[in-house]
Image (cartoon, coloured by chain):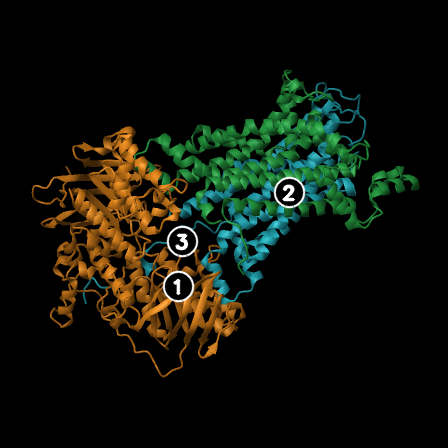
Chain colours: A cyan, B green, C orange
Amino acid sequence: MSQLSSDWVADAQIAPPLPAVHGTSLLRRSLKLWRTRIGLALVGFIVLVAIIGPYLAPYGPNTPVGAPNSDPSSKAVLGTDYLGQDVLSRVLYGGRSILVMAVLATALALVAGVAIGLVAAYSRNALDDTLMRGMDVLMALPSILLALVAVAIVGPHAWVIVVAIALTTTPRIARVARGAAQPIVERDFIAASEAMGVPRWRILSGELLPNTLGPLMVEASLRLTYSIALIAALAYLGLSPNPNGANWGTMINQNQLVLAVQPWGAATPIIVIALLTLGTGLIGDGIARTAAGIDRARGEE
Amino acid sequence: MSRFRPTGVWGFILRRLLLGIVVLILVSILVFLATQALPGDPARAILGREANPASLAALRRQLHLDQPVFQQYLTWVTGLLHGNLGRSLEAQEPVSTLIGSKLVNSAVLVALAAVLSIPLSIAIGAWSAFKREKAFDQASSNLLLALAALPEFVVALVLVILFATTVFHVLPAISTVPPGSRPWNNWVALILPVLTLMIAVAPYVARIMRASMIEVLESDYVEMARLKGLPERTVLIRHALPNALGPVFQVIALNLAYLAGGIIVVEFVFNYSGIGGAITEAVVNHDLPVIQALAMLIAALYVVLNLLADVATILVTPKLRTRL
Amino acid sequence: MSAAEPAGQTAGPAVSAVAVQDLRIATESTGTPVISEVSFEIARGEIFGVVGESGSGKTTVGLALLGHARRGLRIAGGTVQLGDRDILTLDEDQLRRLRGSLVSYVPQDPASSLNPALRIGTQLREVIEAHGNQPDSGVAERVAEMMREVALPDDRAFLKRYPHELSGGQQQRVGLAMAFANRPRLIVLDEPTTGLDVTTQAHVLSTVRELATLHDVAALYVSHDLAVVATLAERVAVMYAGRVVEIGGAEELFTSAGHPYTRRLVGAIPRLTGGRSLVGIPGHAVSPGRRPPGCSFAPRCTLRIDQCETAMPPLLPVGPGHAVRCIRAEIVLSEAQSRVGDPIDMPAADAAERLPLRLTDVVASYGQNEILHSVSLSLAAHECLALVGESGSGKTTIARAIAGLHRNWTGTIALDGTELPRAARQRSSETRRQIQYIFQNPYGSLNPRQTIGQIVGQPLRVFGTAKGREADRRIADMLERVSLTAAYARRYPDQLSGGERQRVAIARALVCDPTVLICDEVTSALDVSVQAAIVELLGSLQRDLGLSMLFITHNLPLVRSIAQRVAVLSQGNVVELGDTAQVLTDPQQPYTRQLLADTPSLETATSEAMETATSETGASEPPADLAGA
């Protein structure tokens, strides 16, 4: 036999395997970027402050410590607010409710939004249209307006705020989930599972969801940022569950008028909120860039 | 199953319009149910502690609460369509007179912010895409990322601290528009609020423009245009830009609609007399008719903006026209 | 001057239109060489072919002739002499003036190369206006003339259309018109007929030939399709891993090439005449940066010796106008290229057994449009039936209807005599197990988030055929069967090449012992050599396992190597059905005859048909086995 004809030789013995572009989770890979790390550090720090702050505070949130609007001193490191309460202590107490509500609302919205978005993308028929029209209706009112209306009717209770924000965040997540799922639904491996008769819910959760995690994670961090901003804004407008307790948003409102005299009363919570939202924004951006980088590497094959 | 389906660009507009109307109807039902038809007594909720049987009865009559729910809804909707936005409970005035001038004030803010920020954002986005990964792109991307993450009232207050109260003292911290005068009578007071709104919108428009432009610049047809020996300017302006703008319109519409909510906070910060302030007041005072009217107005604005965006996208994308 | 003369130079007084010398292209970031030592000349009016598979660098070479490198690459060295100037020394402005006027480019995908937002009239006009060859008044007339040259309507209504309002063939002709508009000296054509159906392809190719001859234009034709290049080009360069490995006259290369890779490539091309097994090339080409020292083809070459792996062989002449980059070229040349694979022993279909698959009067639609008009087919046991047709003929619709993926049809589809419900979900688990489907796109048919083991094992889980250790054993077994090792089970699809992924798809389909296997254009997305290997694999599996196979393709010659019977589909109707050899050598229907006539084949381009005839009568002896391979 000629040396040029082939006795079959397995591909495996000849071609070296390409390095895994996948396998390590997206989050872990995104931590290689400095921006994700900075974001994580910021968020971690602020969350820590919010959670264990009350245990570190030198005074209670409502304890009068000195004259109102006095400058920073040895007694009150950041000065006092408009009622003479210690600014630092109030800041340390003021984050919990915002964070808890924001995380809860975003989590609820994620579950609902992803479910709706994936189902809509997969069904490709009248169900898709109906669901998306429903989402359009919910999106017709800007988030803050929806929250305001809800609070106006039922009252500024924590659960109202959480539900209202979840309601306004769900359609936005649903849109993104649907957008991310649509190209996946067209792919043949979904058709292969359908031909095998795999039940629909299994395809949704086992094949569609894992392949849309990238965009979903980015959106989740984005929505968390918004939720935090929204809840703080509501508090700033005077609508928080406990107006007397310490709350970053409320603090800003209370001390805005005396900015020229004692900036720290309003500036400190402003800085804290800014750092927190910057942190979540950076994390989201880090994940997005990592995902784009992976896509690019894949495309170059 | 072939039904009558108007085609072409006009047919598309018609269909979108009908869709928008359906959405508005559904929104109105939602708003109405949320405000008036919830279990419990709206009258009592509104009057709160001042509730006594006489005032409760009077309020119920005023709000038509004694009629069946469906009837109430119809009364309200027909009123809306006739321009009767209801009567403010707090001010005992027709809502329309109450908010008339405030609407103008807010419109001025939003219009200024839009007119100033949108062309700027598009330019920044396009230039960042063209000079990808170079200094301008890196700097602007990071700056815009930071600005996008910050809540508007934080941005507003930072601006106030920077320019009005603490660092510099060049601009006013408050921008009240006294009743009877117009916003442009005191344009210096407009600077900070408009700047805040611009910062709220610019990052998103710039980002989508950049992403869209990058995709277009890497497309086969732009490469082909270069290989045909066309001057770079022709390539950018005739070939790249029109294709890049398609997705941008949707984002612009979305952001302008977002501004309708954004002004609520911004007007509060600067004590600006616009509909944002009106809504906040109405919420605090449980002034149902005002809330309902303003919610519907804003929803209608959202629908109109989206329709305009869809039409604009169709106009710039000939490919979509044949599928209509 | 490099040691190797540009051996492709023709003797004689013809002035070369372009001379490439020692071209080098590298990545911008790391400087990894992508193209090295590429030299050739093209004379005026000559069509020069550049052949290679994916990753060979042929497109990059084509673009370099316009002084252009894609993002991330840069031209690192060498000269491209156009007339009296080396275009690689020109600045941006000079290059711009040159592109579209002296050298033009016809891209691969006409649909994406035309601006979707501009009318075609505008796009045609601007190439003339940009180079200022016409006074404004003459431009419109010039555009009309251009359109006539490529057999397109020249009226203003047509020019007002947008690209998406044109067919694929029309779009490509607009591309050709733009390329020839300024009477360039050189045209680079980058696989311009990929994606067009055979008939349109034939028209476009003849247009290219006409225009090139008419305007005395030199042309560089880049392609992976050897049959097309053979019909069009006079001289050809074969590229592998960024280098020219062989260069010479087309006929010579395809009948008696000097490089092992060229030989294997030619052997991998499906033949219309004679049912022969296809011989693929194991492994796949490695990407730049991971290429071994020494000859890049050595890892896959059956003739390799130690010396091949130490130093890169130079391109040396082996005959007039013929050069080869291989130190064993003499051995290669000494063998006659009659090795096109052994004739296949296709078992006769078993007519006695019950028909595993039967379609009766199937009418299928997409929405309102009827795609299949009363199609009736049957598949006998252990038989491979090929379904051939152009795009839009309905062949994929048939396949999906059988698999239960397309539900909008009437008529009956019966498996083993039992009528099947329309949707896969409505069918019994047993039925679903028996009908298996392999998809066209190896990059979309595997879940990127699952390991190969999970993917191949899915049917076992879904149908409950095997669990745990038994399942693992069967998976490993199947992977070996498709010539992958069991170690592949832990990898992810991203790590596999196109050919490997398609093998995984085959493994997945066969792991549950189906009776009917549907292959939907399973090789269309693969390189020729890989395609040959996959078809070979499928053929041998089908024969060994006694599968009844429905093989769908648009590639007529491919059918000869795998199917016993063939059905020809045109616009939703079966126009011809019969024995493969019969239909392909003596078609009855005009559509089939036209299809065959339009299909470029190596045999008609070279004189292989005659050679095959003589070898079948036993005229040539197999050469002695040389030691030291």
Residue at the extreme bottom of the image, as rendered? C352
Label 3 belongs to which residue? C495
In x, y percent, where is residue C347?
A: 29, 77
> What x and y, as percent, mark residue A137?
64, 46
SS under mark 2: loop
Q: Chain of mark 1?
A: C
Q: Is residue A288 visible?
A: yes
User: Mark 1 and mark 3: span between their CA atoms?
Assistant: 34 Å
Task: Please indicate whether residue C80 sits to the left or right of residue B262 in the image.
Answer: left
Q: Which residue is mark 1?
A: C394
Q: CA distance from mark 2 to mark 1?
A: 44 Å
Which amino acid does the dot numbered 1 rest on? Gly
Crowding at dot 2, Cα within 10 Å, few <14 / some 14-19 / many 20+, comes out as many
The percent position of residue B205, horizontal first and vertical second, equals 53, 34
- Classify C24 as above or below C269: above
- The front one of A105 and C301 is A105
Chain letter, disc 3 residue: C
Examine the image and state in which quarter residue C359 appears: bottom left
Closer-to-camera residue (C362/C291):
C362
Question: What residue type is disc 3 on?
Answer: Gln
Which residue carries the number 2 mark?
A: A140
Q: Amino acid at mark 2?
A: Ala
